[in-house]
């Protein structure tokens, strides 16, 4: 087995491990102090508006600290009205008790959803660590829940046969530098410029690798500029410790294993492995303003998964638990329905690769997505209407059968391609999967 050295030439030989190419679906978890106020305006998806507008009306509940810190806007007004000007963000810590948290129950929900990996926020931008750290007392073992959330969840997730990954806010830590962030340029512009913070983040990253050996190391925003040349040392250490480890692309454009897209932000392509991450609503952290009708619909969620996988991506779908440790019912409901759909259509999703055929929108409004596995073609028909549907797969002459044996499918080979008829479509089938594997 290759041992990596702490230089760019060595770590640049690393490739995306097969398990990550195969797994397709993971669960992201944003849980922290911000889960107590659980507030953000329901505004827009990341990437839809200019960053100056975005930060003033930030829909991310996990950014509560900054939304308060900018001194204006819906979150600031809400806080002044509900808690008053003397109530600091840190005053929420004793209110985060996680009294109903059962990590095994979470793992069972993730398993039923069909998730192959989980990524937990171990330290978000507020600097509060969900693990015991040699480098700070500002953590969930000494404060708040008084539990090693990272350790307990890692054990439960792995016991359920799912891979465990860890998120870490590498660049931003408001315990070290907390000037308000008003626009994208401020992300690096306000980050701590000290070598003390660079060492702190580097040490904590290694601490997470050494203590938990995460299958995914998911860094956020970036890496302290003053220690960029320490990056290959960390990566080499990680890959040597976790031979099947994989990292994302938030390393100051210096390094990545896979690319990321967050809502509408980020650019990806079919030639390189990528990951779509998003919340079920517009926030990652739990936002009490986001009722069932403000979350992604089940049909849109299944469409998102299929469209992502067909175009060489994984879907990292976020859950935002409540402060008491329970996952909101409306989020669990979506996970269960998605899991049931995946159980039926799993052969067309897990372990597949991009087909030579690209996703296409037909004139009748039906969208076709394609995957391939071991030489077999899989076709997914989306946006079907209740009752009778038909569509042509141009240039394809062969057989197709549905993954779901209860779906009636009729096919006719024509000069142009295969004409497929689904005479009795029901909306609870969502996307219909077909395969030529007999």
Image (tube, rainbow, N blue to C red):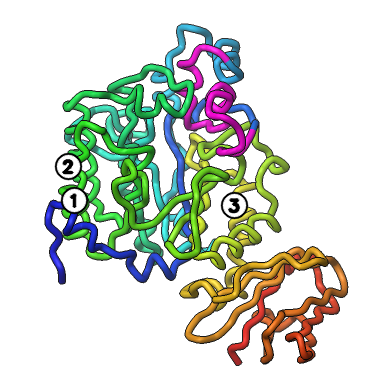
> Which of disc 3 and disc 2 is earlier in sequence?
2
Q: Measuring 15% from the left and 48% from the top, which residue is drawn there?
A: 233
Q: Mark 1 against mark 2, which lies toward the viewer?
A: 2
Residue at image mark 1: 210
240 on left or right of 305: left
Residue located at (38% from left, 31% from top) = 125
Query: Which contiguous range is marked in magenta?
Result: 44-72
> Can I make out residue 113 in this image?
yes
Point 18% across, 39% down: residue: 203
Question: Mark 2 Cα within 10 Å, few/some/many (few <14, many 20+)?
Answer: some
Marks 3 and 1, how far apart in space? 32 Å
Mark 1 surroundings: few (<14), some (14-19) or many (≥20) residues within 10 A: some
Q: Is residue 7 above or below residue 339?
A: above
Out of 253 and 83, give the one closest to the viewer. 253
Q: Which residue is mark 2?
A: 230
Question: Mark 1 or 2 closer to N-term?
Answer: 1
Checking the image for residue 332, the label placed there is 3
Q: Determine whether 269 is above or below 210 in the image.
A: below
Q: Is residue 29 left or right of residue 130?
A: right
Q: Judging from the image, what secondary structure is the residue with disc 3 in?
A: helix
Q: Position of residue 120 (x, y in %)?
A: 39, 47
Quarter occupied by residue 379:
bottom right
| Gap between marks 1 and 2 measured at Cα | 17 Å
Quarter the N terminus occupies: bottom left
Front one among 94 and 196:
196
Residue drawn where x is 32% and y is 28% of the image: 173
Q: Secondary structure at mark 1?
A: helix
| Nearer to the camera, 262 or 141 | 262
């Amino acid at each position: 087995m290759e041992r990596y050295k702490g230089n760019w030439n060595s770590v640049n030989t690393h490739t995306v491990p097969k398990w990550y190419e195969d797994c397709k679906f993971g669960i992201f978890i944003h849980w922290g102090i911000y889960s107590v106020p659980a507030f953000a305006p329901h505004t827009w998806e990341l990437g839809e508006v200019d960053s100056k507008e975005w930060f003033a009306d930030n829909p991310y509940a996990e950014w509560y600290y900054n939304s308060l810190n900018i001194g204006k806007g819906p979150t600031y007004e809400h806080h002044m009205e509900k808690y008053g000007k003397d109530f600091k963000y840190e005053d929420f810590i004793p209110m985060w008790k996680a009294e109903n948290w059962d990590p095994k129950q979470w793992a069972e929900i993730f398993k039923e959803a069909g998730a192959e990996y989980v990524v937990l926020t171990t330290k978000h931008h507020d600097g509060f660590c969900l693990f015991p750290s040699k480098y700070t007392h500002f953590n969930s073992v000494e404060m708040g829940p008084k539990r090693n959330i990272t350790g307990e969840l890692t054990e439960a997730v792995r016991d359920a046969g799912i891979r465990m990954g860890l998120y870490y806010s590498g660049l931003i830590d408001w315990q070290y530098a907390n000037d308000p962030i008003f626009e994208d340029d401020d992300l690096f512009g306000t980050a701590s410029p000290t070598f003390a913070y660079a060492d702190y983040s580097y040490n904590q990253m290694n601490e997470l690798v050494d203590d938990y050996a995460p299958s995914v190391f998911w860094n956020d925003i970036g890496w302290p500029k003053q220690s960029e040349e320490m990056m290959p040392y960390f990566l080499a250490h990680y890959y040597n410790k976790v031979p099947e480890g994989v990292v994302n692309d938030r390393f100051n454009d210096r390094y990545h294993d896979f690319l990321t897209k967050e809502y509408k932000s980020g650019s990806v392509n079919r030639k390189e492995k990528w990951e779509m991450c998003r919340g079920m609503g517009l926030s990652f952290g739990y936002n009490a303003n986001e009722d069932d009708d403000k979350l992604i619909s089940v049909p849109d969620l299944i469409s998102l998964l299929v469209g992502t996988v067909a175009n060489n991506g994984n879907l990292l779908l976020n859950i935002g638990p409540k402060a008491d440790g329970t996952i909101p019912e409306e989020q669990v409901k979506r996970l269960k329905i998605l899991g049931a759909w995946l159980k039926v259509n799993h052969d067309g999703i897990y372990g597949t690769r991009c087909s030579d055929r690209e996703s296409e929108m037909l004139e009748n409004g039906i969208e076709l997505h394609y995957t391939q596995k071991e030489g077999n073609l899989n076709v997914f028909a989306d946006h079907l209407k209740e009752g009778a549907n038909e569509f042509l797969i141009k240039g394809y002459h062969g057989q197709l059968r549905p993954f779901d044996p209860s779906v009636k499918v009729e096919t006719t080979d024509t000069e142009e391609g295969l004409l497929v008829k689904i005479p009795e479509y029901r909306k609870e089938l969502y996307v219909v999967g077909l395969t030529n594997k007999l």
